[in-house]
Image (cartoon, helix red, strand yellow):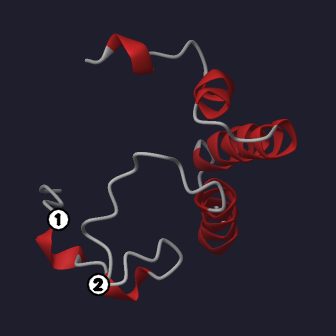
Amino acid sequence: MNDSMTAVSLSDFLGRIGLPQAARDRVVEIDRILADELVGDEPDADGCADLVLEAAGLIADLDPTGFDWKDWDDDDHPGDVDGFDFHSLDWGAE
């Protein structure tokens, strides 16, 4: 593991990649909400998906320097997931 990317917490990691404090706080709050929701017997899948997309949007708006967008579309546009090849991922077994 690369020691330079080791973070004590999610908030520390988000700060390290340059996410502004307000966005960092919201992503940490989303993480807490998801954790609480997913321990329940019947998590709200749509609500959880909305939260994940919100967190992803906050981080994607940052456009971190050095992030490898090679598996995205030909224009390397981070906001367009249509060009991402989901079939190339190793999803593992259930």
**Can you give x and y, in whole percent of width and height, for residue 3 in the image?**
35, 11
The image shows residue 89, relative to residue 19, as above or below, that is below
Q: Is residue 24 left or right of residue 79?
A: right
Name which quarter of the figure residue 28 lies in: top right
**Can you give x and y, in whole percent of width and height, for residue 60 in the image?**
59, 60
Q: At 70% across and 68% down in the image, what residue appears? A: 47
The image shows residue 24, relative to residue 73, as above or below, that is above
Closer to the camera in the image, 70 or 9: 70
Residue linked to disc 2: 74
The quadrant in which the C terminus is found is bottom left
The image shows residue 81, relative to residue 59, as above or below, that is below
Q: At 25% across and 65% down in the image, what residue appears? A: 70
Q: Amino acid at mark 2?
A: Asp
Query: Which of marks 2 and 1 precedes in the sequence?
Result: 2
Name which quarter of the figure residue 76 lies in: bottom left
Secondary structure of the residue carrying tag 1 is: loop
Q: At 64% across and 74% down in the image, what residue appears? A: 46
Residue 89 image label: 1
Mark 1 Cα-neighbour bin, 10 Å: few <14, some 14–19, many ≥20: few
Q: Nearer the viewer, mark 1 or mark 2?
A: 2
Q: At 22% across and 78% down in the image, what residue appears? A: 85
